[in-house]
Image (cartoon, rainbow, N blue to C red):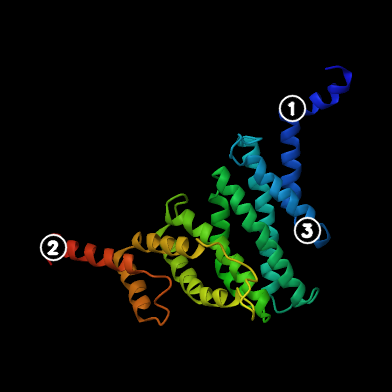
Amino acid sequence: MGAEAEPILARLQPVNPSAILGIFLSAIRFATSSPSSSMADLKSSAQEQLEYMITEDDDAPILTADDEIKSEVKQCVKRLFSRFNNVLEALLSEHEESISEEEKMQLFQSHLLDLSWACQILSKMEIMREFVSSWVDASDKIIKATEQSSRTTEIVEIKLKVIEVAAKVLEAIGYGTVILPTAKRLHLVKLWLPFARATRPLIDSATTDDEGTMTFKPDGELWQSLESTFVSMILALPSGDQAEILTEWLENQHIHYPDLTEAFEVWCFRSKVAKRRLGL
């Protein structure tokens, strides 16, 4: 083919694995570094390409996550979560005057977007445990901070992103990917179930404008998936705790979501069987 074809053929040769690793590590550090808003597009591009690199589609992933890569990803996300915790503290502090409330909410929203993306990466690599633990520990503060904003559009978008991340975390817990003590699982259900119940109508009513056009579109499976996760988590709790949660659900005006009918039916069946076996 001659000398003219050599540059083209060189571009078609496999990339050195060490070069791929170097690119990945540099990109993950940048993508989780919370850069300024002026670099938002570059950060977004880095996040997209990182996800592409480890995704198996019609072709094999560009890079297979070994222990070194997993360790670096976990450290990067840990640092990202630490900055997110600092943003939470600033939002909830009554004495923090260095930046405006609007700037704090923008930082909160930006970090939530990054955490949502990081959650997907960790899930693909099957290293969710530390992220789940951090989210669980911060859950009370996250919900409290979410209620801070008075701007309707902003708070709807923030609540949607919070629900998306919480759904992934709760799914990991509900289906046994991450094991937590009973007391923590009970607290999470009592914390996030009312939040999801109150948030869905708000998001559903705000996703269309006055002309009926979608302003932003939640994942179509989000609510169904979250509902199934709640059912799974409730059924794994002690019977008395299940009864308490189901009683509150039956007395609540928002009984339609989440629909805990399946959990109610299983609880009734188990209770009847237990009574018969124990001769009560």
Query: Along the polypeptide, which appears first: circle 3 or circle 1?
Result: 1
Residue flagged by tag 2: what amino acid is it?
A: Arg
Residue 16 has which mark? 1
Q: Nearer the viewer, residue 136 or 254?
A: 254
Which residue sits at x=74%, y=77%?
101
* Mark 2 surroundings within 10 Å by alpha-carbon count, few (fewer than 14), some (14 through 19), many (20 or more): few
Q: Position of residue 104 (x, y in %)?
A: 74, 72
Residue shown at 71% from the left, 52% from the top = 32
Q: Position of residue 71 (x, y in %)?
A: 63, 41
- Residue 69: image quadrant is top right
Please state which of the two labelled residues, at mark 3 or mark 2, is closer to the viewer.
3
Q: Element under label 2?
A: helix
Q: Is 136 or 195 nearer to us in this picture?
A: 195
Question: What residue is drawn where x is 59% and y is 74%?
Answer: 144
Q: Residues within 10 Å of mark 1 (few under 14, many from 20)?
A: few
Crowdedness of circle 3 by 10 Å Cα count: few (<14), some, many (20+)? some
Q: CA distance from mark 3 to mark 1?
A: 29 Å
Residue 54 shows in this picture: yes
Q: Position of residue 256 (x, y in %)?
A: 40, 75
Residue type at tag 3: Ala
Location of mark 3 (residue): 40
Could you tell me the amino acid type at mark 1? Asn
Location of residue 68 (image quadrant): top right
Q: Residue at x 74, y 27 (%)?
A: 16
Residue 269 lies, with reference to residue 67, above or below; the image says below
